[in-house]
Image (tube, rainbow, N blue to C red):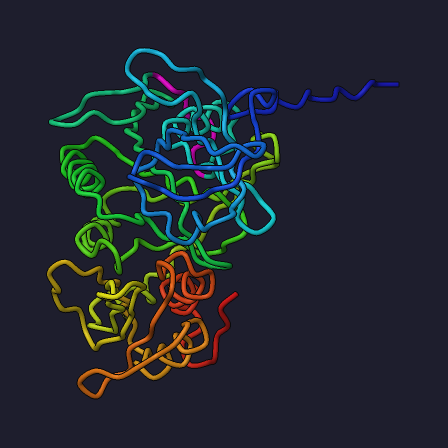
Amino acid sequence: MEVQKIKPEPARYHAVNPEKLRSARFLERPNRFLVRCSLEGQDIEAFLPNPGRLWEILLPGTELLISKDGVREGRKTAYTVIAAKKKNNFILLHTHLTNDAAEFLLKVGKVPGLEGWRVAKREAVFGRSRFDFLLEKDGRRLILEVKSCSLFGERLAMFPDAPSDRGRKHVEELAGLAEEGVSGAVLFLVQSCQPDYFLPDFHTDPKFAHSLYGNKDKIRLIPVGVRWTDGMGISGAPRLLNIPWGVYEENSSCTGVSLVLGERGRGGFWVKAEDGEKHHAGLKVIPIRSGALEIGEIERNLASAADGEGAEDGRRVFYFNNPPLENPSLAAMVLYLRTDGLLDQGREGTYH
């Protein structure tokens, strides 16, 4: 009787050694690359290698996974943030580890559409830019740029969550190289396998979104979702996401509604909703580009999240005792309207 051969499973990839991971609770983010968190009852500082805004993730009390790396020359903190828990799953925040994860998935043939491609080189220089990977297959070459995507709702993921001139430059240079006969692709590694769809974040960075849309027929766009275990190992096969360009076309050019956030002179904070996107010196403005969104809908949800309200120039103003973006209800509303709400246009959505 012929003995059936069983192919061994590839070794599971871990972003870091699980034995180095420790659980902490997020307290605040003094600057882009530094967080304060509580570790076993002590307040500590940790390096956050992620330039994104992460508004919907870094809420007070959020569980973080950090690693102890020790203080050495060139850095002031002994800990590094690796991941954060969003609902029931951890997501990778350490952007420097994204390419390592992508290389593993490429080597084991788990990136949809890139099966059989071999990593010929990392940090490959073409034109005026350095790209993440040069891949080869059957005498062909493919330049691959990798982007880590941690912004997602229940069904829709978006990139970037902060303006990315570098990302736009990479897209445009890949498109230019494609016209010269050099194939290129962008792999968006979505740090969750829950979403079904992916779009460029035209709320946050309309220039990047416009560039990606305009060059979508010149370069390959590969958005895939991955699931991370509690030990920051990749679990299962990545999931290929769909790109609903029709949703982009319907909403990206809309003026929509903006949230304007400011501080009150006697303490606390205020938020109001405005039509369109206007510049306000010294204030934070969060645009929500949606063709079906009305100010009244936003104000009803602001009222349920706020600690009080008033009126100014005939417009409702909502008061918060603490920074508004640290309010889970407000953060969930913004996330929903910018992601899943685009898919739910015409029917009432929920923010949770």
Image coordinates of residue 133 in percent, x first then y, are 32, 24
The one of 219 and 94 positioned closer to us in this rendering: 94
**Identity of the residue drawn at 44% across and 56% down:** 197
Image coordinates of residue 238 in percent, x first then y, are 53, 39
User: As displayed, is residue 340 above or below residue 144?
Assistant: below
User: As displayed, is residue 326 above or below residue 106?
Assistant: below
**Identity of the residue drawn at 17% across and 69% down:** 277
235 magenta-colored: no
Residue 241 as seen in the image, left or right of residue 200:
right
Residue 287 as seen in the image, left or right of residue 10:
left
Q: Residue furthest right?
A: 1
User: As displayed, is residue 301 above or below residue 182?
Assistant: below
Q: Residue furthest top?
A: 73
Q: Quadrant of the N terminus?
A: top right
The one of 50 and 222 positioned closer to us in this rendering: 50
Picture quadrant of residue 251: bottom left
The one of 225 and 89 positioned closer to us in this rendering: 89
First to last magenta residue range: 113-120
